[in-house]
Amino acid sequence: MSVVVLPANQPADRFYLGGDRIAAFRGTAPAGDHVPEDWVGSATTVAGFDEVGLTVLPDGRFLRAALAEDPVRWLGAAHVARFGAKPALLVKLLDAGERLPVHAHPDDAFAQSHLGCRNGKTESWIILDAEPGAKVHLGFREDVPPSTLASWVETQDRETMLGALHDIEVTAGDTVYVPAGYPHAIGPGILLLELQQAADLSLLLEYDGFAIDGPRDGHLGIGFAAALPCVRHEAVPAGTLEEIRGRIDDRHIFPAYADSFFRADHHSGPSTWEPGFSIVVVLSGTGRLTWGTDSSVDLRQGTTVLVPHDAGSIRIDGDVALVRCRPPAA
């Protein structure tokens, strides 16, 4: 089975601005000003849609359909035994052309008990580019009683909500692991690579001023009163923030406990990999990815490659830096 070089897959008309940085990273023409996300190798749909967000393969099939037809060749027997014919991973490029609203994602237990979903949404960020002074906002600085948070959401007290979060200034190469339940927002001027659990589940604590109907679409379909308990109300201490932040210079990018949700490995220069389903995002440089006896594809900044398990061992040559995104260990 061959690897697949993936074109951009950008759901249009998202509720926030962005897209130019994705085009610049990929070396393509801008697709518009409200296409701030590129869903790479996606078998997950945008919430509320049947097909939007799905990757289309060169033969015209959705990746999701191809996985269902031949899951073992794509994903490997051990993965299929644990997760079925799903990659258990969603990879995105995200360009924050404006600050994203304060929001949170449910964890697995909440998603299973309240939403009928197999998993929630723990995620992580690799900062690819950031304007000077750019920030992300993550976790409450002090305990916030549930009634207080409910009042902020009801009155859309945006300034207070944002001010209650830790501010983290970021530069290219920084990494942040974002556990489910942590309220967060991504500031403007940031291009990031996001790895997450394969679900589009967002509770919008803030929606006023954004091009979205929060009272209709922002509460996971169960109402704010039922959804707000998925938010972590306890303060996130400085020590925890330090633990979940890092730099891409490390080969194993995120904390070891992130492996139960997704895995990401940073490779710079020549390397070899064991067989396994993965999504490759090239950060810089040029090189080649080779599989089998002599099959290969060129790599350059912005190239994204889908690697099936059945492609076998992989060799990377050249002066190229990339991230190999993988599902949780089977």
Image (cartoon, rainbow, N blue to C red):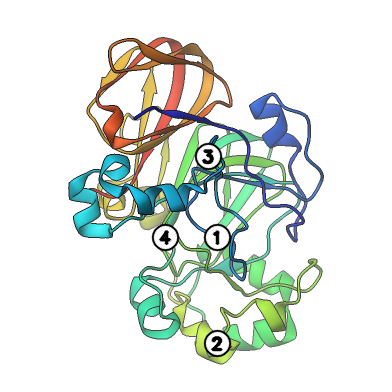
Indicate the secondary structure of the residue bearing disc 2: loop
Indicate the secondary structure of the residue bearing disc 3: loop
Count the numbered circles shown.
Answer: 4
Q: Quadrant of the N terminus?
A: top left
Q: Residue beneath label 3, please?
A: 57
Instruction: Give the label, 4 or 3, closer to the camera.
Output: 3
Q: Nearer the viewer, residue 20 or 169?
A: 20
Q: Residue beneath label 2, please?
A: 222
Q: Nearer the viewer, residue 142 or 19?
A: 19
Residue drawn at (29%, 44%) of the image: 75
Q: Residue beneath label 1, please?
A: 45
Residue drawn at (56%, 44%) of the image: 56
Residue 305 % position (x, y) = 47, 30
Residue 14 % position (x, y) = 73, 57
Residue drawn at (45%, 20%) of the image: 321
Mark 1 burial class by Cα count in 10 Å: few <14, some 14-19, many 20+: some
Instruction: Give the label, 3 or 2, closer to the camera.
Output: 3
What distance separates the C-alpha of mark 1 from that of mark 3?
A: 15 Å
Indicate the secondary structure of the residue bearing disc 1: loop
What distance separates the C-alpha of mark 2 from that of mark 1?
A: 19 Å
Mark 3 burial class by Cα count in 10 Å: few <14, some 14-19, many 20+: some
Q: Indicate the amino acid at tag 2.
A: Ile
Q: Indicate the amino acid at tag 3.
A: Leu
The reply to whether residue 142 is visible in this rendering is yes
Please report contact status of discs 3 and 2: CB closer than 8 Å, yes or no: no
The reply to whether residue 124 is visible in this rendering is no
Q: Residue beneath label 4, please?
A: 122
- Mark seen at residue 270: none
